[in-house]
Amino acid sequence: MTTMTDTSNAARFREFKMPDVGEGLTEAEILKWYVQPGDTVTDGQVVCEVETAKAAVELPIPFDGVVHELRFPEGTTVDVGQVIIAVDVAPGSGDPVAEEPAAAPAPAPEAAPEEPKGRQPVLVGYGVAESSTKRRARKGAETAPPAAAPAAVQAELNGQGTAAVPEARPLAKPPVRKLAKDLGIDLATVTPTGVGGVITRDDVHAAATPSEPVAPSAPSVAPVVAEAEVPVQQGARETRIPVKGVRKAIAQAMVGSAFTAPHVTEFVTVDVTRTMKLVAELKEDKDMAGVRVNPLLVIAKALLVAIKRNPGVNAVWDEANQEIVQKHYVNLGIAAATPRGLIVPNIKDAHDQTLPQLAASLGELVATARDGKTSPAAMAGGTVTITNVGVFGVDTGTPILNPGESAILAVGAIKLQPWVHKGKVKPRQVTTLALSFDHRLIDGELGSKFLADIAAILEQPKRLITWA
């Protein structure tokens, strides 16, 4: 590559490196480029989608300019800190170097202007600064936004693969647009309350109607999506699938968990007929309008009440300091099947949520997982997990602890079975629960009480009130 000595030209080029998302990740695979050399980009615009060991995420560029060079093709795994794209920040000045990719410089780090204070390349959903997140521009979209509108928001586009609409379009940040898409809300119908006419998350929630589906049909925890198919050559006796990204991280985490924490699993079979009746009643309750009600909602609430009665299960073993760390909050993890493998996003501070709020959180969590847009932050900090193996039609399982947690509840299929009820054999709705826990800090008595409390609530859901 030819070295460019013209300092004026050298100053024209800015390099964007694969960012460190702060979750201990060291590499990411470039799944898709949304721009090509010659495209105009603006500060905060999404330029590519990458897959880390935890999720698929979109990366926004932190400056304006014209794309000069993409350093890696799609499908390449890139280390954190490597330059992935070069941008001409002063197009039209000096020599047209951007037309000759082979002569593009690789500026030394000290030659590149520093990022504005407080601004760092981060993942979509976090934003590089308040009110500065923008979607990627498409070629040909050169119309300037109205001066009265916030420039950073006006530059956003409606999703991928669509042409830019420069003026008459709703103003909203990418996370809000994604939420609206998940809930099936047309942003053009939403009344904005944000500064400068920007649509907020609360505006989208307010526009949601009871008929909007936000969660899967009962009793599933999350949509079951088949593993991405790998082309098989005719006559082949074997197919080798590279283990990377989320799948690789899952394997490493499960091995680490299984051989670090001494697992104990206990089981209980319970009559949940009254819970199923409660679910039917809640569906007709006006306070639950706009959210999807299913057995998972009641099971999650039962688990939260059981934790309140048995707080010792909501803890973690700190091997380095030889301490048991008691958590006074519950970040409730929900295992979800996605095309990239099993992920466990969690509902932050689930213990503080009302039943309608918990239902809305479950719906949003499931919709995000279904779209493959769960962020690393959404999967960090979990304290206890629910996994619904019953969605596959099986009775129960022996779940492995999510790393960093000490308890996981597996819910089996809810089936009509013969059951002794009030001295007579009757058909009842029955399921089997399995609780795996870390025996270093949860002994048999505590684990048994916790599981028994969950079962008792599901058998007599009025205990949600009397025990809360």
Image: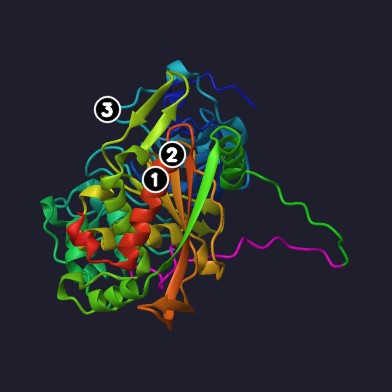
Q: Quadrant of residue 364?
A: bottom left
Judging by the rendered image, the residue that carries numbered circle 2 is 405
Q: Which quadrant would the C terminus be assigned to in this image?
A: bottom left
Judging by the rendered image, the residue that carries numbered circle 1 is 384
Q: Earlier in the sequence, mark 3 or mark 2?
A: 3
What is the spatial separation of the Cα atoms under label 3 and label 1, in whole angstroms? Answer: 34 Å
- Label 2, residues with CA under 10 Å away: few <14, some 14-19, many ≥20: many
Q: Disc 1 residue type? A: Val
Give left or right: position of 96 versus 172: right
Q: Nearer the viewer, mark 3 or mark 1?
A: 1
What is the spatial separation of the Cα atoms under label 3 and label 2, in whole angstroms? Answer: 33 Å
| Residue 301 inside the magenta-drawn segment | no
Q: Residue at x 22, y 79 (%)?
A: 284
Q: Is residue 326 visible?
A: yes
Q: Which quadrant would the N terminus be assigned to in this image?
A: top right
Q: Residue at x 26, y 58 (%)?
A: 358
